[in-house]
């Protein structure tokens, strides 16, 4: 074999080549670029576009910032209709999206998109519910028969995290309902407490859901328990809280 010749990809060299990983455009696809981080013309570099968050229009990064205000969308070209689950809505437009009526108009929780719809002399604001960041939203889009959450309901939410799904449950139950949000992590709990400052129907409980006796005096009777704890004994955890 002649020096400098590479059987895979030809060009200037194999995957080692002249440069680090990926060479100078060599690698698997000749001039198409290697799979390395730095080589080739079409390499799989780390600078690609963000993953589009679900919403009314394509694009948009999946930003983790909480409370950031996402641009309010115009309601001229969209229509909102009720979903079969009370308190949940579908926004029909360029792209259909699952939405909930914003309990705190003008505020986003996790950078989600918002849309305002004129109804008479008033404008009602809705928040996009991203099924890639909420198991409950994914279940609704998947056709779950019943979510047992409706306006005025009292919900015990185990594993509330930073409050992404909790905020939408807060929208659904409305000002007459309550969401008892239990979260063990103190870091996520800080975000949850900040969320509860704006949404008065959320009661944050920073405790371990495995020990409900520590917070039983804070929680009244509820209509439904929603568990998002990702633990092997989550059935036992729900039973302890029932």
Image (cartoon, rainbow, N blue to C red):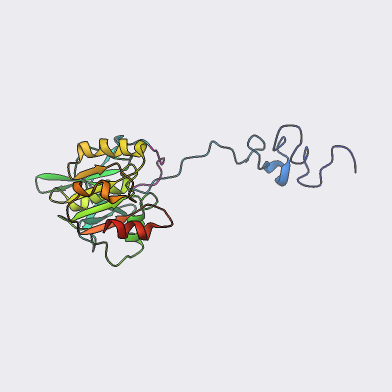
Going by the picture, which residue comes out furthest to the right? 1
Q: Residue 157: give x, y in percent of width and height.
A: 28, 51
Residue that protrudes farthest toward the bottom in the picture: 145
Is residue 136 among what the camera can see? yes
Q: Quadrant of the N terminus?
A: top right
Q: Is residue 199 left or right of residue 30?
A: left
Q: Which residue lies furthest to the left in this view?
A: 121
- Magenta span includes 24: no
Q: Give x and y (percent) for residue 144.
A: 32, 65
Would you say the magenta stretch is mainly helix, strand or loop? loop
Q: Give the range drawn in magenta.
A: 57-64
Q: Which residue is drawn at 75% across and 37% down?
A: 16
Residue toward you, 209 or 90: 209
* Left or right of 173 on screen, residue 52: right
Does residue 13 lie above or below 145 as drawn?
above
Q: Which of 72 and 66 is in front in this view?
A: 66
Q: Observer-nearest residue: 45 or 120?
A: 45
Q: Does the magenta stretch include residue 62?
A: yes
Q: Which residue lies furthest to the top in this view?
A: 19
**Nearer the observer, 20 or 204:** 204
Residue 15 sits in quarter: top right
**Residue positioned 26% across, 37% down in the render:** 193
Residue 78 seen by the camera:
no
Total count of labels: 0
Image x and y of residue 159, in percent? 34, 49
Q: Position of residue 187 (x, y in %)?
A: 36, 36
Of the 4 image quadrants, the one containing the C terminus is bottom left
């Amino acid at each position: 074999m002649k020096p400098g010749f590479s059987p895979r990809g030809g060009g200037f060299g194999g995957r080692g080549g002249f440069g680090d990983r990926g060479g100078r455009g060599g690698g698997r696809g000749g001039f198409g670029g290697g799979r390395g981080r730095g080589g080739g013309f079409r390499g799989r570099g780390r600078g690609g576009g963000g993953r589009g968050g679900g919403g009314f229009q394509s694009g948009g990064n999946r930003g983790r910032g909480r409370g950031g205000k996402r641009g309010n969308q115009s309601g001229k070209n969209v229509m909102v209709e009720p979903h079969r689950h009370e308190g949940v809505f579908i926004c029909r437009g360029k792209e259909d999206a699952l939405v909930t009526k914003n309990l705190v108009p003008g505020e986003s929780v996790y950078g989600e998109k918002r849309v305002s719809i004129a109804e008479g002399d008033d404008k009602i604001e809705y928040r996009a519910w991203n099924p890639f960041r909420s198991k409950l939203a994914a279940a609704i889009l998947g056709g779950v028969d019943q979510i047992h959450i409706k306006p005025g309901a009292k919900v015990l939410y185990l594993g509330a995290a930073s409050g992404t799904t909790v905020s939408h449950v807060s929208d659904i139950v409305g000002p007459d309902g309550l969401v008892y949000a239990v979260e063990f992590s103190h870091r996520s709990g800080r975000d949850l407490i900040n969320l509860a400052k704006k949404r008065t129907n959320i009661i944050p409980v920073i405790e371990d859901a495995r020990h409900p006796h520590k917070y039983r005096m804070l929680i009244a009777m509820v209509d439904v328990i929603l568990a998002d704890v990702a633990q092997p004994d989550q059935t036992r955890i729900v039973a302890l809280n029932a």
